[in-house]
Image (cartoon, rainbow, N blue to C red):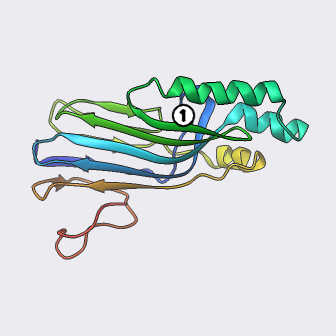
Amino acid sequence: MSKKLLSVLAASAVLLTGCLIPESFKVEADFAANGDYSFSYDGTAVHAMAAAEEKQKGSLREKDEEGLKAEATKMKKDPMVQSAEYLGQGRYQLKLLAKKKAGENMKMMDIFSVTQGKDGVITIASPKLAAKDVQELSKLGIKIDGTLEVVLPKNATIISHNATSKPKFFGLFGTYA
């Protein structure tokens, strides 16, 4: 693994593939000294179209609820999906896990990505939502509340980060969050 590591941690998450929006979650990225890493998501996500329909009509049709439930079954076929349970009202409980080798890029359902440049610099990113997008989500009853924690090997050099907390005691204990 390159000793350079760019850790760009954005405060907000963006829309997931298939109109899912992360709601309450914890994401962890854990890097080994050789550059291999795992990336996990544990939390809820809401289907944006279902939230809009529910806001407009007061509830979802039974047929729509059944379709959303069937979608959870389809999600389970993805090797990254450890579990996907439909909770009702357009919401899912998800556990996702990706294990990657050094240099392998990763995009987890369009929320978070890990990329490595030709110079060996690794970037961990989550695009930030604009204030107007946050307001629109709020109107639908969706509040994004989550944490991204990054565990780095001791030989990593941090070029930049926007974490709200970082390892303590000379970087030996804790994570970037």
- In percent of the image, x 54 and y 34: which residue is there? 16
- 128 vs 102: above or below: below
- In percent of the image, x 29 and y 62: which residue is there? 175
Q: Is residue 8 visible?
A: no
- In percent of the image, x 22 and y 53: which residue is there? 159
In this view, the residue in front, 5 or 27, is 27
Q: Is residue 78 visible?
A: yes
Q: Which residue is mark 1?
A: 16
The amino acid at mark 1 is Leu
Q: Position of residue 149 (x, y in %)?
A: 36, 56
Q: Position of residue 169 (x, y in %)?
A: 19, 76
> Which image quarter: residue 69?
top right
Give the farthest residue toward the bottom: 169
Q: Position of residue 151 (x, y in %)?
A: 26, 56
Q: Secondary structure at mark 1?
A: loop
- 173 vs 51: above or below: below
Q: How many C-alpha atoms fall within 10 Å of the one at disc 1: few (<14), some, or many (≥20)?
A: some
Left or right position of 155 against 41: left
